[in-house]
Image (cartoon, rainbow, N blue to C red):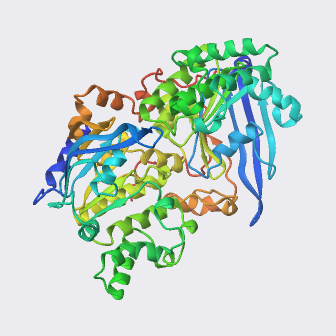
Amino acid sequence: MPDTTATAARTDTRQNTGDPALIIEGLTKSYPARRNLIGRVTETVDAVRGVSLEVRRGETLALVGESGAGKSTVGRLALRLIEPDAGTIKVLGEDITAMGRSDLRKVRGRATMIFQDPFKSLNPRAPIRYSIAEPMFSQGGYSAADRDKRVAALLDRVGLTAHHLDRYPYEMSGGQLQRVAIARALVTDPEIVVCDEPVAALDMSIRSHVVNLLRELQKERNLAYLFISHDMSLVRVIADRIAVMKRGEIIECNDAATLFADPTHEYSRTLLSAIPAAHPSLRTFRPAPAGRTVG
Amino acid sequence: MTITTEKALEQDVVLKVDDLCVDFKTPDHGWTRIVDNVAFSVRKGETLGLVGESGSGKTVTSLAIMHLLARNARVSGSVVVNDRDLNALPEKQLDEVRGSEVAMIFQEPRRSLNPAFTVGDQVAEAVRRHRKCSRKDAWARAVELFDRVGIPEPAKRAHAYPHEFSGGMCQRVMLAMALSCDPDVLIADEPTTALDVTVQRQVLGLIHELQLELGLGVLLITHDLSVVAEVCDRAAVMYAGRIVEDAPILELFDNPGHPYTAGLLHAMPDPVRHAEKMGVIPGRVPPPHEFVESCRFAPRCPYAREECTSGYIPLSTVGTDHLVRCVRTDEISLEDAFYA
């Protein structure tokens, strides 16, 4: 496999110093599936079952799987946007599993999130200027001048200009808005970002811009990404390690190169073999084309 | 090419679209042309991919073919199915053609189904719409179709409602409905975009199987070049309402003639080339009221010169059966322009 060396080289150049950015252990979350007449839960469905994983500083751990596998639930649990039923979560060395609200708020400045659809994740009634600055208000400790400076610097870094500041989300394209969401996620200098399908809603020609931007920012700031995606061909390009989820459990976690070259679990193999070909000569269930012969 | 083979090929054409233009009346900009002189043909047993980003007009093209656009749209040009021009047919005859000669499936199968009726009812309704038969026979035909599209326990599952089915299963129901009257052409608008990869593979495989069996001509509309690579015989690339390239599939991937096609190919994730950085196309698709007469890709094109913006550029033939709308296609190599 030609890609093996490329991915391996990338992993080697990272220094993994200090505590891992995120450690979760035995995380479980179930939801009520059925209630009886008086509203008591008679049946539950396990969205996440005993998931453990570790994201090292500066690396991209991709969480892949089909819809309903529990990827997004894990992402949300990792920042306690929803509460786990069991298990522990450590963010940047701190156990946040039982942390109080005000402490948790501080952690959320250093561990942030980017969502799939920026039209839904940004406040439609707030100008871009406010959306980017908002995390600094909730974190506190930034002067007005400081806030303006940081917003301006990040806006420029994600490839937008000052005249975007007073616009509202409906005035901007999906790609531009996802840049805003990235700026917002980075404005408090986090060390880990949970990216929940950050490019799935974008057009192809826009998608690679945003992927490049995320990768550049990772390098500049030594960011750790928990990158949730269903797109195996994208994950193959950007992930250092990959965890495969199925029905609420992680069934396999390995270096990206190793996983692609030699998946051990049957389901991983199925998932990999379902990736559509990148070139018509590699197509599988249809015979490769000979071209239409004319005359 | 001799005249006889040309004729033979002509006879195989099941869908021929020519000079298709669609204008929409918009409150801000008056009549705006969304689809501009689109032309292509689909042969018996062939899959043509219509590729483009959102805003390129690919879905509007498919809806125009089926006459499914709202009243604020004006359609001109010709859409010929089995020697009949749909654009010249009265609404009543159109109803006979739609479904029985051309069928269509959509991106979100569950949204295309009526949540209040069982899937069996809905397919049986489609059967009775086009054929005189009893309810019982129509139901039997529906169950037979469910079996054909790989729904397990078809007789039992026909009594299920759409919400009891997964996305992949709903798309199978849509396919059963589309096939209920033995169409010659199937238009599939992003049929697998909302589905998981493993399910996508099953659905694409099923479409292919049915195509082999029934000799369907398929127009597959998609934004995903890897889906095109997987199933299409040829592909037409649309940009800003125009077809910019039309070529047999291998030719398109190996020897793209239009910078936009090359840009899309470079933006497909590739573990070797993109170890550090993915290929990008700068800029964005223009909104329809900003469509110009000359090359619409020029503002984003790394190869653009003065001649690109000076006037209309027609589709020209390069090589065998390969059309490109670019004045510079012969002089440029499209190797690594998109790694800024």
Question: Where A181 sits versus B166, above or below?
Answer: below
Residue A122 percent across, percent down from the top left: 47, 65
Please state the horizontal and vertical placement of residue A206, each as a whole percent of the image.
47, 55
Q: Nearer the viewer, residue A46 or A237?
A: A46
Q: Is residue B112 left or right of residue A151?
A: right
Displayed quadrant of residue B248? top right
Residue that appears at 25% across and 70% down: A106
Relative to the observer, which residue lies in front, A20 or A96?
Answer: A96
Residue A151: quadrant of the picture: bottom left
Label total for image: 0
| Outermost residue toward the front in this view | A38
- Residue B207 figure quarter: top right
Position of B207 relative to A2 (above/below): above
**Relative depth, front residue between A213 and B240:** A213
Is B120 left, or right, of A148 in this rendering? right
Q: Visible in this render: residue A156?
A: no
Q: Nearer the viewer, residue B339 or B290?
A: B290
Q: Quadrant of the N terminus of chain A?
A: top left
* B323 displayed left or right of B82: left
Residue B10 x %, y %: 73, 23
Image quadrant occupied by the C terminus of chain A: top right
The answer to whether residue A228 of the structure is visible from this angle is yes
Q: Which residue is painted at 64% across and 34% down in the image?
A: B113
From the viewer's perspective, tell me whether residue B128 is left or right of residue A214. right
